[in-house]
Amino acid sequence: MAALADFTSFVQARWPVLVRSLVGAGVEVGRAEAVVAGVLARHRSGWARLARDEDADLRVWADVRAAAGLAADPGAVAPVLHDPASIEHTVEVAVSPDPFGLIDEQAARRRRAVLRRLAAAAAACVMVGCYLAWATTRTPSPDVDDEANPAPVPWYAEGRLHLAAVSVELPAVESFAPGGTGEVVFRDRRGQWHSIDGDGDVTEASAPTDSESVDAGVRSSLDGRYIVRIGTDGARVYDASRGQLIDSGLGTDVRVLDAAFADDGSVTYVLSNVVEKRPADTGVRLSETGTQVLRTCTLDPVECRDLVRVSGTSGTLRLR
């Protein structure tokens, strides 16, 4: 109830500010209202986490700009909150007095889109046997929460996959495979492959080919400049532009289980305090004792920070 009241208060205070700020950026009023309502609808279920862990004004305005197709403006809040020129320029803009009706409409539209996809899949099964096969083998719609990812790459722990803006309940994951931009591909315990997009929507996927598999011990940045090789002695980082090994940013008291590069060239490691003689593997099950950590490092210059900790009794922590 407290989270709902806080969300309601935020909407009442910020609805005209957000809409008018978009209008000031060149977005038509009707579209601005739809964009803001859609972003608020996505955040409603996870509002308690957002309000507790982030600056709501920063996060919501950033998401509103992205949804409207505007360039990112890190660290900015809606201009009508503080900029006299923006306030004066948009003060005459008439904004809908019923933001909650528009928010509910956007949430319902999203639900209808999901149902249409399911209905289309069912309609494609002309024979009853085909439909029954689909009904018994399809992936159930997962529980999706709006939750900002503290790490720059997707990761999985305690039955949840953490994407850029949402976390998704996926308790039956067996392994992961490389996916396209903005998607994660995984295999469930029945051996079926699925793809999940940035909004948490799951669809069936074909099994990856051998050429799409990942070398268990080697990771490279998207631009090819950095290469990380994981071994029993830790992680070695090679800078191809200089033709030499460089500091990985890791100490000697941890074991490296996995690594993944983000779009910005930073590398995120899965670390364990437990030293065991086991080969690195993208699907490795971590020790049930000790603590697993996600550590993200920039490599030029080397700066590292620990972002996520998972106790050994909580199960596994994996990157994908």
Image: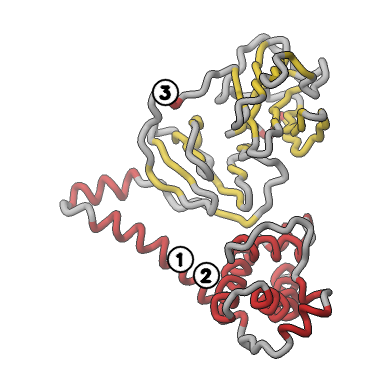
Q: Residue at x 38, y 26 (%)?
A: 209
How dense is the environment of label 3, judged by Cα within 10 Å: few (below 14), some, or many (20 and up)? few
Residue under circle 3? 211
How dense is the environment of label 2, judged by Cα within 10 Å: few (below 14), some, or many (20 and up)? some
Q: Residue at x 58, y 40 (%)?
A: 159
Residue under circle 2? 107
Q: Secondary structure at mark 1?
A: helix
Residues at marks 1 and 3, CA–CA distance in whole angstroms: 36 Å
Question: In the rendering, at what x and y percent does residue 154 appear?
Answer: 61, 40
Q: Are marks 2 and 1 in contact (CB under 8 Å)?
A: yes
Residues at marks 3 and 2, CA–CA distance in whole angstroms: 40 Å
In which quadrant of the rendered image does the C terminus lie? top right
Q: Please state which of residues 167 and 135 is positioned toward the viewer in this rendering.
A: 167
Tag 1: amino acid: Arg
Residues at marks 2 and 1, CA–CA distance in whole angstroms: 6 Å
The nearer-to-camera label among 1 and 3 is 3
Taking 18 as reference, is 126 above or below it? above
Q: Earlier in the sequence, mark 3 or mark 2?
A: 2
Residue under circle 1? 111
Tag 2: amino acid: Ala
Q: How is the image coloured?
A: secondary structure
